[in-house]
Image (spheres, grey):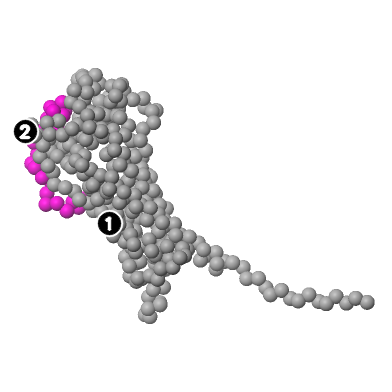
């Protein structure tokens, strides 16, 4: 097979994969772009002292007097503390006022939550299609690399190739870490400390408050028999096991940190934003090139215009 034929085969496969997976890939990239802003919102809104032990206990005394809450999460960009295990579906409490938030109230958490559900499951719980589309994205990258170093020109095709090559590490890392999350690959030697009996929620809050400003607490909950706290430490979302004698760090899940942009605060979030716009640019220019090629093929060929017969005048 000659080089030109080899290149043509790769290009055709590249185009067909793009067409087949264009819609799910577009949904994944757009929702990923929305989620890229969540670490920015979390980090910039979590001002020191906006949540403390006293205020948190007052909220629990008021809204969970029977101590039924199993966990909590803090959303500083909404100024809301969410309690799970209280009522039918948990409740959201405004931290400033201490009042329960109305169900129909606007919240950024709802936007981020909807984006996350679509990003992980699309619609109708199509998690398998998310995985297939992620594999397709990696296949598109590999096919692009196999087609060789491009000649960059000031054209749509040139921009498509330029974006692909200059953002290649980012475009590879995003789907690769996504697949690692889907298959439970953490790149760590183990989960970390052994299980211990979960503490009452109020006591767990006191343990966290000994070493950290509660304004940086992202969530506190029981998972897999372990009581865990996720805390924003200078932009990195660190995971700890909560025990009576203090916090024990859990091994880092690097694929999650990289994929979610939670390893360096605003800077890692900006990396994800750039990645999302790069993949959007690749999808947009790729589909444009395919559509323009199809339109050129279907453009009707006009017949040659016959010269008009001379007009004879008397």
- Where residue 80 sits, quadrant-wise, is top left
Residue at point 33% right, 59% down? Answer: 167
Residue 66 in picture, x, y percent from top left: 19, 20
- Residue, far front: 48
Q: Does the magenta stretch include residue 283?
A: no
**In terms of secondary structure, where does tag 1 sit?**
helix
Q: Are marks 2 and 1 in contact (CB under 8 Å)?
A: no
Q: Is residue 207 magenta?
A: yes
Q: In this view, does 293 lie to the left or right of 307?
A: left
Quadrant that contains the N terminus: bottom left
> Against 312, is 214 above or below?
above
Q: How crowded is the residue under tag 2: few (<14 C-alpha within 10 Å), some, or many (20+)?
A: few
In the drawing, does residue 152 fall left or right of residue 295?
Answer: left
Is residue 228 in sight in this rendering? yes
Is residue 127 at all visible to an observer of this figure? Answer: no
Q: Position of residue 25 (x, y in %)?
A: 38, 53
Q: Which residue lies furthest to the bottom in this view?
A: 2
Region in magenta:
184-208
Question: Which of the two residues, 163 or 136, is positioned nearer the viewer here?
Answer: 163
Give the vertical position of 247 relative to 30 (above or below): above
The structure residue drawn at horizontal position 20% and vertical position 42%, both measured from the top left corner, is 234
Residue highlighted by disc 2? 245
- Where residue 68 appears, as percent x and y from the top left, is 20, 24
Residue picked out by circle 1: 173
Specify the quadrant that holds the C terminus.
Answer: bottom right
Q: Which secondary structure dominates the residues rendered in magenta?
A: loop
- What separation in Å lies between label 2 and label 1 (alpha carbons)? 38 Å
What secondary structure is marked by label 2? loop
273 lies above or below 206 = below
Judging depth in this view, the residue of 309 and 200 nearest the camera is 309
Residue at image position (50%, 61%) is 291
Residue at 20% of width from left, 50% of height from top? 254
């Amino acid at each position: 097979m000659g080089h030109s034929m080899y290149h043509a085969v790769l290009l055709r496969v590249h185009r067909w994969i793009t067409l087949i997976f264009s819609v799910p890939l577009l949904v994944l990239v757009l929702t990923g772009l929305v989620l890229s802003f969540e670490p920015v919102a979390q980090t910039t809104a979590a001002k020191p002292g906006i949540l403390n032990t006293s205020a948190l206990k007052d909220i629990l005394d008021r809204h969970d007097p029977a101590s039924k809450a199993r966990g909590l999460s803090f959303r500083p960009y909404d100024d809301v503390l969410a309690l799970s295990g209280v009522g039918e579906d948990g409740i959201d409490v405004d931290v400033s006022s201490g009042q329960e938030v109305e169900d129909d109230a606007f919240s950024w958490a709802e936007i981020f939550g909807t984006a996350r559900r679509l990003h992980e499951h699309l619609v109708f719980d199509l998690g398998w299609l998310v995985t297939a589309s992620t594999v397709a994205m990696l296949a598109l990258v590999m096919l692009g690399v196999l087609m060789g170093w491009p000649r960059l020109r000031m054209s749509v095709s040139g921009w498509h190739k330029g974006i692909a090559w200059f953002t290649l590490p980012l475009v590879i890392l995003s789907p690769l870490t996504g697949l690692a999350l889907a298959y439970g690959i953490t790149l760590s030697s183990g989960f970390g400390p052994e299980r211990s009996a979960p503490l009452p929620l109020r006591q767990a809050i006191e343990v966290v408050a000994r070493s950290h400003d509660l304004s940086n607490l992202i969530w506190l909950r029981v998972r897999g028999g372990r009581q865990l706290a996720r805390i924003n430490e200078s932009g990195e979302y660190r995971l700890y096991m909560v025990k009576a004698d203090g916090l024990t760090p859990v091994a880092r899940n690097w694929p999650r940190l990289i994929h979610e942009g939670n390893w360096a605060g605003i800077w890692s979030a900006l990396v994800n934003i750039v990645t999302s716009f790069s993949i959007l640019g690749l999808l947009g220019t790729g589909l444009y090139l395919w559509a323009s090629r199809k339109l050129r093929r279907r453009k009707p060929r006009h017949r040659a215009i016959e010269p008009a017969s001379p007009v004879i005048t008397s």
